[in-house]
Amino acid sequence: MRVAFFVNSIESEEPSFTTTSLAMAALVRGHDVCYVAPGDFVLRPDDSLMVRATAVPVAKYKDPQAFHGAFQNKEAQIRTIDVREVDVIFLRNDPSLDSEERPWAAHIGAMFGRLASERGAIVVNDPSGLALAQNKLYFQDFPKAVRPETLISKSIEEIRAFIGDHRKGVIIKPLQGSGGKNVFKIATPDDANLNQIFEAVSGEGYLIAQAYLPEAKAGDIRFFMMNGKPLVRDGVYAAFRRVPAKGDLRSNMHAAGTAEAAKITDGILAVAEMVRPKLIEDGMFLVGLDIVGDKILEINVFTPGGLPDIAGMHKIDFSEEIIEALENKIVIRKAYAGSMSNRALATL
């Protein structure tokens, strides 16, 4: 099969990214691999959807660095192909990275992904489902039992009152965004920094005020789910603990967080089970849950990362299972002669 990985930009990709691991796994399994960026689609007058694809040279790469170098330099072949020649489009971009400087690019993957699915490509995560998840408001659609108490507002008075009701403190962050950018902890409504933080962050739109979970001091657990189920092999779950840097409340890897092995408890599995039905309903093939205690802080449906960290800890490359799952979707699509919707295929 031919797999196209949709990313923010080819130049910004790195050897350590999960997308790199997935692309290498697809190559090892004998598939054609290419990368696509937001400016690479063309919808022609005859209604054909074309894509400018950067093809990864077929070879045995000794490590991610060698692979990364191959498709970043002149060895990579760029050609325009009909999207009907692509079996799977894997949407792996982070919309928040484009929201400020390239707002036109932020949701191109979901927009053209929908058109690609109508022309026969399997698109994951399902683009219609991703359209529902364009900001953190999507999280509020999941069961209340798995969510910390949350206020979403642009009113500093509302936020100040919410902080006053939570003696353990409140986390303030923008409704849009990722990677731990502009995340703050406020202890009391009289905090001297509240006005300054509000002015700085509210410029990005609505704010989320979320009850602080003391267990977050030890970091959160990034827990992968695939096809609505925990991703697991031989009793080892695709999961790890993201530990904040000293003096930092954020556990994001982009914010100097570190990865450690995580113990997966029955409570964590119960949380995953509770969100499973909606993930399936929305066609979310691969997601990363960020769990603290018995609560989920975020659900990453666009570009969950960390598979290389897990591989380093457990010597298990879960990218293989993910590519195999995509292969199975191709078989299912052929068996049903194209009568099954992309959203249904995404989580089978």
Image: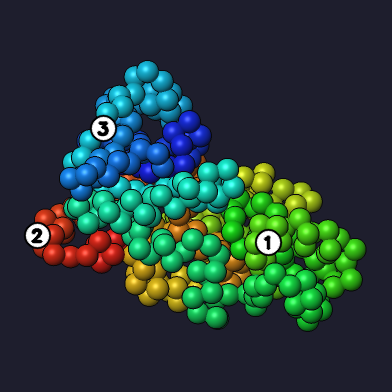
In the image as oriented, which residue stretches furthest toward the top? 74
As helix, strand or loop, the secondary structure at mark 1 comes to strand
The amino acid marked with disc number 1 is: Lys
Circle on res. 173: 1
Q: Earlier in the sequence, mark 3 or mark 2?
A: 3
Tell whether 319 sits left or right of 11.
left
When the figure is inspected, residue 318 is found, relative to residue 134, above or below; the finding is above
Q: Which of pointers 2 and 1 lies earlier in the amino acid sequence?
A: 1
Q: Which quarter of the picture shows residue 219?
A: bottom right
Question: Is 298 located above or below residue 92 in the figure?
Answer: below
Q: For the residue labelled by badge 2, is the local secondary structure a helix, a strand or a loop?
A: loop
Pointer 3 residue: 80
- Asked if one can make out residue 217 in the rendered structure from this viewpoint, the answer is no
Question: Could you tell me which residue is drawn at 54 percent across and 69 percent down?
Answer: 137
> What x and y, as percent, mark residue 64?
43, 31
Q: CA distance from mark 1 to mark 3?
A: 40 Å
Which residue lies under the disc numbered 2?
Answer: 337
- Residues tagged 1 and 3 counted as in contact (Cβ below 8 A): no
Q: Is residue 114 above or below residue 102?
A: below
Asked whether the residues under the numbered discs 3 and 2 touch, taking CB atoms below 8 Å apart as contact, a structural biologist would say: no
Q: Position of residue 325 (x, y in %)?
A: 27, 54
What residue is shown at x 70% (from left), y 69% (from top)? Answer: 154
Residue at 59% x, 55% y: name it: 177
Badge 2, how many Cα within 10 Å: few under 14, some, many 20+?
A: few
Inspect the image, locate mark 2, and give the three-letter code of the amino acid beneath it: Ala
226 sits left or right of 267 in the view? left
Q: Nearer the viewer, mark 1 or mark 3?
A: 3
Q: Position of residue 167 (x, y in %)?
A: 81, 77
What separation in Å lies between label 2 and label 1 (alpha carbons)? Answer: 46 Å
